[in-house]
Image: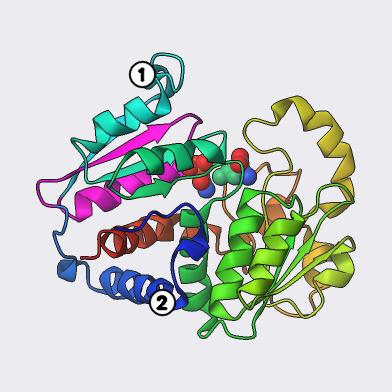
């Protein structure tokens, strides 16, 4: 049983197994094994979601299990009862607990309280399930990822942090170009580098994207930071992914975005809907990635 709170909770070999299984089951859905037959998976959400909730539910259904979606107001983390008491209760019915939380610490508290795997469906620190889907998408488009150059333009946030570990585990180079004050955390950079990752943090987006195989962005204001939206809009104005920035890659670089996108802010519609955009493939791959990940965590 393995928790999946950050991408590097998986070894490089385990991550490869997940990606291989995701590709194989995507190509031949009739081969999907019913490893969750008769089992429940809890999905606890403190924040909204379109892709993560739906893809995880469909992954559980595909594996023969029963997903139980729980809205924030239904459980009341540390209000109606403690996080630990919620986890213990749901862990007695379900084989896996998955959760989208404001504070990453909540996931540690859940994981400490139960024996079943806990999966991070997004926290302030990480979005590892997204990163697995992104790796699957990049592999489908680029083949081997070793030595490829991925450039993340924008906020050094949860999505960027998980990409740093995803890159480190697969041999990709990751450059994160952010405005001063919004860079990827030093501890994420150090950990990714210690895992063998070629991770760079820079401030110049145009310089960073040169020779990129893929350019990735995410919203400037993440869920929970809405009170900073105006300040952030000003700080990130020069970091929009638009046709000029994509042209500066000097390549037909792929464009990635975890979605939801704010068209006209971090990305123009021209790029999001453009010929090298793979955002819908990424969104679809959330389900394939989740369906391949769960058996790995349950060691099935
Ligand atoms: N990419 C992603 O996590 O989307 P949702 O917030 O809609 O789940
Ligand atoms: N960084 C964004 C990702 C949404 C999928 C957020 O945390 O809101």
- Start and end of the magenta stretch? 37-64
Q: Residue furthest front?
A: 112
Choose top left, top right, bottom left or bottom right for residue 177: bottom right
Residue 105 in the image, given as x and y percentages of width and height = 54, 38
Q: Which residue is mark 1?
A: 74
| Quarter of the image where the N terminus is located | bottom left
Cβ atoms at labels 1 and 2 below 8 Å apart: no
Q: Is residue 214 visible?
A: no
Q: Secondary structure at mark 2?
A: helix
Residue 135 in the image, given as x and y percentages of width and height = 51, 69
Please tell me whether residue 211 is drawn above or below residue 216 in the rendered image. below
Q: Is 242 left or right of 127, judged from the image as shown?
A: right
Pointer 2 residue Cβ closer than 8 Å to ligand 1: no
Residue 34 in the image, given as x and y percentages of width and height = 13, 59
Name the residue: 35% across, 58% down. Answer: 2
Query: Between marks 1 and 2, how big is the CA–CA gap?
Result: 37 Å
State the mark number for residue 16.
2
Please tell me whether residue 20 is drawn above or below residue 228 in the rendered image. below
Q: Secondary structure at mark 1?
A: helix
In magenta stretch: residue 57: yes
Please tell me whether residue 3 is drawn above or below residue 68 in the rendered image. below
Few, some or many residues within 10 Å of mark 1 (<14, 14–19, 20+): few
In magenta stretch: residue 20: no
Q: Is 104 left or right of 117, judged from the image as shown?
A: right
Between disc 1 and disc 2, whose residue precedes?
Answer: 2
Few, some or many residues within 10 Å of mark 2 (<14, 14–19, 20+): some
Choose top left, top right, bottom left or bottom right for residue 215: bottom right
Q: Is residue 172 visible?
A: yes
Q: Residue furthest left?
A: 38
| Quarter of the image where the C terminus is located | bottom left
Please tell me whether residue 75 is drawn above or below residue 169 in the rendered image. above
């Amino acid at each position: 049983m393995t928790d999946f709170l950050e991408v590097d909770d998986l070894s490089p070999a385990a991550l490869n197994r997940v990606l291989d299984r995701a590709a194989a089951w995507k190509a031949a859905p009739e081969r999907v094994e019913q490893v969750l037959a008769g089992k429940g998976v809890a999905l606890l959400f403190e924040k909204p979601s379109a892709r993560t909730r739906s893809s995880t539910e469909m992954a559980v259904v595909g594996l023969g299990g029963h997903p139980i979606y729980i809205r924030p107001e239904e459980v009341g983390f540390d209000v109606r009862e403690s996080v630990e008491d919620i986890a213990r209760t749901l862990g007695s019915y379900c084989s896996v607990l998955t959760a989208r939380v404001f504070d990453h610490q909540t996931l540690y508290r859940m994981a400490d309280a139960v024996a079943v795997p806990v999966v991070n469906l997004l926290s302030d620190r990480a979005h590892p399930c997204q990163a697995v889907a992104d790796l699957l998408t990049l592999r489908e488009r680029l083949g081997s990822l070793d030595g490829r150059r991925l450039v993340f333009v924008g906020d050094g946030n949860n999505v960027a942090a998980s990409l740093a570990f995803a890159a480190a585990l697969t041999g990709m180079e990751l450059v994160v170009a952010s405005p001063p004050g919004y860079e990827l955390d030093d501890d994420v950079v150090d950990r990714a580098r210690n895992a063998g990752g070629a991770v760079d943090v820079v401030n110049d987006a145009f310089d960073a994207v040169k020779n990129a195989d893929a350019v990735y962005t995410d919203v400037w204001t993440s869920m929970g930071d809405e009170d900073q939206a105006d300040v952030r809009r000003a700080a990130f104005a020069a970091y929009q992914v638009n046709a000029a920035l994509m042209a500066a890659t000097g390549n037909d670089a792929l464009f990635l975005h975890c979605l939801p996108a704010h068209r006209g802010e971090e990305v123009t519609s021209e790029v999001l809907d453009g010929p090298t955009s793979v955002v819908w493939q990424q969104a679809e791959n959330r389900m394939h990635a989740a369906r391949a990940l769960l058996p790995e965590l349950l060691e099935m």
